[in-house]
Amino acid sequence: MSQILETMMIICFGLSWPISVYKSYKARTTNGKSLVFLLAIWIGYICGIGGKLLAGNINYVLIIYFFNLLVVSCDLILYFRNHALDLQRARQAKTKEAIA
């Protein structure tokens, strides 16, 4: 029963991450995103995977952990892309102000 509950928890988390990645991709900004939060989640999945491996509890749930880690990694990559875009927009705005 505990494996079923853990699986349901991981699946629920896993369903939300692709939506977050899509929104990050479309938004092209870091507004509303927290790097600390993303890193905490990423580290949490690393720890969860490590805990399962160390305990020898290798089962289908581990696949979901890896999938979630992959998707959160994509969101982290998009965070840094969007941060660079934010900086670029800020530089362009400063240049326009200086010209005006």
Image (cartoon, rainbow, N blue to C red):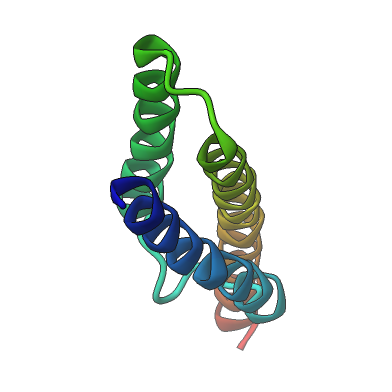
Q: How many marks?
A: 0
In this view, 35 is above or below 54? below
Q: Is residue 65 left or right of residue 34?
A: right
Residue located at (50% from left, 62% from top) = 11
Depth check, front residue: 96 or 53: 53
Query: Which image quarter: residue 66?
Result: top right
In this view, 4 is above or below 55? below
Q: Where residue 34 appears, x then y in whole percent?
A: 35, 60
Q: Is residue 16 left or right of residue 96?
A: left
Query: Which residue lies most toward the bottom here?
Result: 100
Q: Where residue 39 appears, x then y in whole percent?
A: 38, 42
Depth check, front residue: 100 or 5: 5
Residue located at (66% from left, 63% from top) = 85
Q: Where residue 47 appears, x then y in whole percent?
A: 35, 27
Q: Where residue 24 appears, x then y in whole percent?
A: 61, 71
Depth check, front residue: 54 or 23: 54
In this view, 28 is above or below 73? below
Query: Which image quarter: residue 44?
Result: top left
Q: Is residue 38 left or right of residue 88?
A: left
Image quadrant holding the C terminus, namely bottom right
Query: Which image quarter: residue 7?
Result: bottom left
